[in-house]
Amino acid sequence: MAVANLQAVTGEKITFDFDIGRSTITPNFVTPGRSAAAPYAHTIAFTDKISISIDLPENRQLPNNITLKLTNSNDGFSIKEYNEIALINYSSGGRHFRTGVGGLIVICVLGGVPRNPIPSLQAVEVILNYSHHAEALICPVNGTSKFNMCLYNAHVAQGGNRFG
């Protein structure tokens, strides 16, 4: 199990828990530099389920619910653009909200010769929905509502196996 942690400017903590699988595929896309007639088999690292939790600080008003959008960047190696939207309703856990998303999320591709890992990037947007307005959480790194991360790098940084 690997974990990726993010924190918004206003103190909300967003945690992603995920497991990693590995598979070899011959994709239905063309690898850059190769012809359509000779697709290149890639080994992919993927996750097919992510558990997401959001913890709100004491000084923040509790929203009615939270909208979370997780996107896998289209880097030319993704099988498809992954786009998951989850609505997280208030839970009895006080200031703790939790949901899960599923579907194949490619987090790393082994391609080329030598077979170097090419991590996929993910982006997440979190919106707190109140009765009369909505508020997007802001990333402290880029100052926008889009948090950029790399689940593969989080996996490796926590002692997970490198692919290659």
Image (spheres, helix red, strand yellow):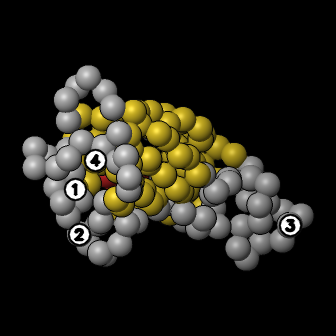
Instruction: Please name the amino acid that badge 4 sits on.
Output: Ile
Q: Element type at marker 4?
A: strand
Query: Which picture quadrant has residue 80?
Result: bottom right
Camera-near label (3 vs 4) is 4
Residue 156, disc: none
Instruction: Please name the amino acid that badge 3 sits on.
Output: Ala
Tell me the CA gap for discs 1 and 2.
Answer: 8 Å
Q: Earlier in the sequence, mark 1 or mark 2?
A: 1
Residue position for label 3: 36
Residue position for label 2: 140
Q: Is residue 12 above or below residue 31?
A: above
Q: Nearer the viewer, residue 106 or 111?
A: 106
Q: Is residue 17 above or below residue 25?
A: above
Mark 3 near mark 4, Cβ–Cβ under 8 Å? no
Residue 7, disc: 1
Q: Residues within 10 Å of mark 4 (few under 14, many from 20)?
A: some
Residue position for label 4: 14
Mark 1 near mark 2, Cβ–Cβ under 8 Å? yes
Q: Nearer the viewer, residue 49 or 19?
A: 49
Q: Earlier in the sequence, mark 3 or mark 4?
A: 4
Query: Which picture quadrant has residue 104?
Result: top right
Q: Earlier in the sequence, mark 1 or mark 3?
A: 1
Q: Is residue 92 visible?
A: yes
Tell me the CA gap for discs 1 and 4.
Answer: 6 Å
Camera-near label (1 vs 3) is 1
Camera-near label (3 vs 2) is 2
Instruction: Please name the amino acid that badge 1 sits on.
Output: Gln
Q: Element type at marker 2?
A: loop
